[in-house]
Image (tube, rainbow, N blue to C red):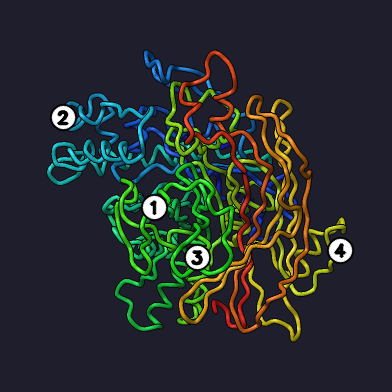
């Protein structure tokens, strides 16, 4: 493990490390597997460095977050706080990798206002900022409105930052250095590679209460002097260009990607077809290429809800997908933006758009590829927690130690999800390459192992073949890949294979119910078509005994299905991804509401959801006619 403050490596050591790099074909870690293995992590968590997390009372720092992620105990809560008392918490299962993604906006102001003796510590604005925001029993819009009032009172004002802003810039540098130092300290390098960290931050764009955030993940320890925040660059195109100039093209070895997250509260902005000042198709294609290269993956789900799909959206055709109701944040009667955009989603205002959801963005990307020759939305999937408590990955529904007091029960207690990455080994290099090629998937929390391949000649009995993985790679592409130029008379064949989450001895994982393949494509009139097929397992009578949280009914230890698209059109672009469903299980509110003397009074409210059907979403496989790259 590399610790902060350790001596710089010699030239000979650097050369040896370079020659051992997996990019040159040699394994770096003892756990190297050429056919890849799944690693579990959380690429979205906030600590006390973040403006909002600090307001909520979070005092853990980036190093504490990584300590927790590796399975070590940390102390949370506050002395004298009866609803969130001090207590020790620990992950039931450590993560393989993590990234602390604190908000770059207000880095400096938060540090000045929370560091006793700083030039701004005793200012009126800083005193207001240090007044904790209450969370228990409150809605998200109420919390957001109070945060806006506090922050607008002065974190970026001359009172805190100085007349020329120099105080905040210097303090931001200190916060950014702390972020880097923690990542360096906890990144476990060769040969053990037991745990991997990434230097990262969140680009927090919230214009008019519309959420258009991105997590920025760096490949290695070479990063810009300061993170590029929304305050520095208030457009996504500007962010991508600045990351290119300050990192990718800087000649320093810096590499970076950005992950759009929580698009379900973007009022139609996250996946809007926008190219800034680019007018011609050639200029727009250049912007689309930039976006596609900078944003290879997106966050499908997190504690602020699911961003896969929503039923009844404007110009979306096909049968109703019963599973699109999963973890929705916006009310059913929220107006549809149709072909426009809105604002105010974080405050429960404005409209909801099909461009808030990943499935429809994928189809929009296909239409853009037909129009300008480049698909700007050819992204893979992950999931994350977006925890603001400094704790990456505590997604086990049964645990009650993180939520004490009387939590707000509606719409249920969504704990967020995890990112799964298929990589040769648990190193920064290997994991980052996997994210670049989109060989990733997300789950709503469980650790089911899922493979997804697409090609032209997979046999119908591939599920019975012990060499399924080797033949999957050899005969086509894995999740995140693209197949092209259909052989005459052929339709693409897909195979999805899933193993249940084993869980722990005390809390075994839930059995699997079904594996599905979702297909989407656009038509010439701007409408989006969707189709969902069960390819293994199917609906069953599985349910939960809410008096004990015990599962009832049949389920599978593993599922595998091979499916050939019967309605394939070789002239039509299409996108396919797999979705794997567990049987229903108790969510955190269900565990909290088991019979007993500590059963909360809100348990009998009709709106309290006590069960959940956990799931996984694989990165897609795309089909494109022709052979031109990027088409």
Residue 310 vertical placement versus 129 (above, below): below
* Residue holding disc 4: 461
Question: Is there any visible trace of residue 167 in the rendered image?
Answer: yes
* Image coords of residue 78 (percent x, y): 39, 19
Q: Decide: marks 2, 1 in contact (CB < 8 A)?
A: no
> Looking at the image, which residue is at 64% across and 41% down?
446
Q: Nearer the viewer, residue 142 or 538?
A: 538
Residue located farthest toward the bottom when viewing the structure as drawn: 488
Q: Quadrant of residue 394?
A: top right
Tell me if 579 is positioned left or right of 521 in this view. Answer: right
Q: Quadrant of residue 464?
A: bottom right
* Image coords of residue 531 (percent x, y): 62, 66
Calculate the distance from the C-alpha at mark 3 to the C-alpha at mark 4: 32 Å
* Residue holding disc 1: 333
Question: Is there any visible trace of residue 196 in the rendered image?
Answer: no
Calculate the distance from the C-alpha at mark 2 to the C-alpha at mark 3: 48 Å
Q: Nearer the viewer, residue 541 or 505?
A: 541
The label nearer to you, 2 versus 3, is 3
**Mark 4 crowd level (few <14, some 14–19, many ≥20, 10 Å Cα):** few
Which circle's residue, 2 or 3, is located before the other in the chain? Answer: 2
Calculate the distance from the C-alpha at mark 1 to the C-alpha at mark 3: 20 Å
Tell me if 120 is positioned left or right of 485 in this view. Answer: left
* Residue holding disc 2: 123
Calculate the distance from the C-alpha at mark 1 to the C-alpha at mark 4: 46 Å
The label nearer to you, 2 versus 1, is 1
The label nearer to you, 4 versus 2, is 4
* Image coords of residue 316 (percent x, y): 49, 68
> Looking at the image, which residue is at 28% across and 35% down?
110
* Residue holding disc 3: 360
Q: Quadrant of the C terminus?
A: bottom right
Q: Decide: marks 1, 3 in contact (CB < 8 A)?
A: no
**Mark 1 crowd level (few <14, some 14–19, many ≥20, 10 Å Cα):** few
């Amino acid at each position: 493990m590399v610790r902060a403050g350790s001596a710089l490596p010699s030239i000979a050591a650097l050369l040896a490390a370079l020659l051992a790099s997996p990019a040159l074909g040699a394994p770096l870690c003892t756990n190297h597997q050429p056919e890849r293995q799944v690693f579990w992590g959380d690429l979205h968590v906030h600590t006390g460095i973040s403006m909002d997390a600090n307001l909520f009372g979070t005092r853990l720092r980036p190093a504490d977050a990584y300590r927790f992620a590796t399975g070590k105990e940390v102390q949370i809560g506050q002395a004298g706080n009866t609803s969130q008392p001090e207590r020790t918490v620990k992950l039931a299962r450590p993560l393989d990798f993590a990234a602390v993604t604190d908000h770059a906006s207000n880095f400096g102001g938060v540090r000045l206002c929370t560091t006793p003796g700083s030039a701004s510590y005793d200012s009126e604005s800083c005193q207001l900022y240090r007044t904790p925001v209450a969370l228990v029993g409150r809605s998200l819009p109420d919390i957001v409105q109070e945060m806006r009032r506090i922050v607008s009172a002065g974190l970026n004002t001359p009172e805190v930052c100085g007349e020329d802003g120099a105080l905040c810039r210097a303090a931001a540098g200190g916060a950014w250095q702390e972020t880097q130092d923690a990542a360096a300290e906890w990144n476990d390098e060769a040969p053990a590679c037991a745990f991997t960290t990434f230097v990262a931050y969140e680009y927090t764009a919230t214009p008019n209460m519309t959420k258009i955030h991105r997590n920025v993940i760096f490949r290695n320890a070479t990063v810009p002097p300061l993170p590029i925040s929304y305050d520095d660059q208030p457009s996504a195109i500007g962010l991508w260009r600045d990351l290119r100039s300050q990192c990718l093209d800087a000649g320093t070895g810096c590499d970076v990607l950005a992950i759009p997250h929580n698009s379900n509260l973007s009022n139609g902005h996250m996946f809007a077809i926008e190219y800034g000042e680019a007018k011609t198709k050639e200029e727009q294609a250049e912007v689309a290429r930039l976006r596609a290269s900078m944003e290879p993956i997106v966050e499908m789900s997190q504690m602020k809800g699911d961003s896969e799909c929503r039923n009844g959206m404007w110009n979306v055709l096909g049968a109703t997908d019963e599973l699109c109701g999963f973890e929705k944040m916006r009310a059913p009667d929220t107006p549809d933006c149709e072909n426009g955009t809105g604002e105010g989603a974080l405050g429960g205002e404005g409209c909801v758009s099909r461009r808030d959801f990943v499935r429809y963005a994928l189809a929009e990307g296909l239409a853009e590829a037909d129009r300008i020759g480049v698909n700007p939305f050819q992204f893979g999937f992950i999931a994350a927690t977006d925890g603001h408590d400094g704790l990456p990955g505590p997604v086990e529904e049964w645990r009650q130690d993180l939520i004490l007091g009387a939590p707000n029960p509606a719409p249920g207690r969504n704990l967020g999800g995890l990112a799964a990455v298929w990589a040769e080994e648990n190193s920064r290099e290997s994991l980052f390459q996997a994210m670049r090629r989109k060989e990733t998937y997300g789950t709503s929390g469980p650790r089911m192992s899922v493979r997804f391949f697409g090609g032209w000649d997979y046999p119908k009995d591939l599920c019975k073949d012990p060499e399924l993985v080797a033949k999957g790679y050899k005969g086509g592409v894995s999740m995140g890949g693209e197949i092209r130029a259909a052989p005459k008379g052929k339709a693409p064949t897909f195979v999805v294979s899933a193993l249940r989450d084993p869980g722990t001895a005390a809390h075994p994982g839930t059995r699997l119910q079904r594996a599905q393949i979702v297909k989407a494509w656009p038509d010439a009139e701007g409408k989006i078509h969707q189709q969902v097929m069960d390819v293994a397992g199917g609906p069953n009578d599985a349910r939960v005994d809410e008096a004990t949280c015990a599962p009832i009914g049949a389920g599978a230890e593993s599922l595998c299905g091979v499916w050939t698209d019967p309605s394939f059109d070789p002239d039509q672009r299409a996108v396919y991804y797999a979705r794997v469903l567990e049987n229903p299980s108790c969510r955190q509110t269900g565990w909290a509401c088991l019979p007993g003397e500590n059963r909360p009074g809100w348990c009998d409210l009709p709106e309290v959801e006590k069960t959940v059907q956990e799931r996984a979403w694989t990165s897609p496989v795309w089909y494109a006619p022709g052979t031109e790259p990027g088409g």
